[in-house]
Amino acid sequence: MKLYEFAPTRSIRVRWALQELGVDFETVQVNLRAGENRRPEFLKLNPAGKLPVLVDGDLVLTESVAIVLYLAEKYPEKGLLPTDPRERAKVNQWLLFAATELEQPLWRIARNKFLYPEDKRQPGDIPVACEDFKAMADVLEKHMDQRQFVVGDSVTVADLVMAYTLDWANEIHLLDGFPQLRAYMDRMYARPHAAPRIAQAFASLKA
């Protein structure tokens, strides 16, 4: 099994799942800053030119949420995905919540701060995106009251995706006023097989 990754990206979610599962894997660093994701050999794996990519035999998977679900299903004995269909549906619900309600405003902020060329940025959308994020973070804050995990009584892939997404928000100071989410995120990253936090991943690029 081979993981194509770049340290601070959503590759973190997949690395975390692999580490929680205790699966041996090979890592291939794809330097986004150097444009290695636009090279023909990488575009054969993912024509979108994005990371992460997981290669497992003849299977090539992109999209971090799809990858972590695949890994959890491949190793059911590890318990990262519930077997009960109702509980599994809840995991899917919160995975989609993270990817749509929380991640999308974070992307809008990033694009309008530094990803887009200056002439395409819309600074006025940043405060709107911040408010959109906070409204949905409040939903999750209330959900996490008296809970250790997003779904059920043990860690699932929903927690790995959610913790990374919250860490992204924390990097731009959007978790102020959400004590449940900060405590939950810190608990997740204190796990023995947790992946590096985003700040650590960025620091590793300078090492």
Image: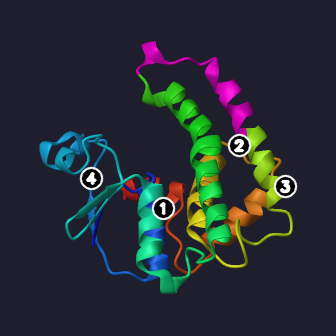
**Horizontal side of residue 63 vs 146, given as left or right:** left
Q: Nearer the viewer, mark 2 or mark 3?
A: 3
Q: CA distance from mark 3 to mark 4?
A: 38 Å
- Identify the amino acid type marked 3: Lys
Specify the quadrant of the image occupied by residue 39: top left
Q: Residue at x 50, y 78 (%)?
A: 20
- Identify the amino acid type marked 2: Leu
Whether residue 179 appears in this view of the structure is no
Q: Residue at x 50, y 87 (%)?
A: 77
Residue closer to the observer: 62 or 130: 62
Q: Secondary structure at mark 1?
A: helix
**Horizontal side of residue 64 vs 136, given as left or right:** left
Question: Would you name the residue on which mark 4 appears?
Answer: 30
Question: Would you name the residue on which mark 2 appears?
Answer: 174
Where in the figure is residue 206, as x and y percent of width and height? 38, 53
Whether residue 131 is in magenta: the answer is: yes
In which quadrant will I find the N terminus?
bottom left
- Sequence-first disc among 3 and 1: 1
Q: Decide: few, some or many residues near mark 3? Use Cα within 10 Å; few <14, some 14-19, many ≥20.
A: few
Q: Secondary structure at mark 2?
A: loop
Whether residue 76 is in magenta: the answer is: no
Q: CA distance from mark 2 to mark 3?
A: 16 Å
- Sequence-first disc among 1 and 4: 1
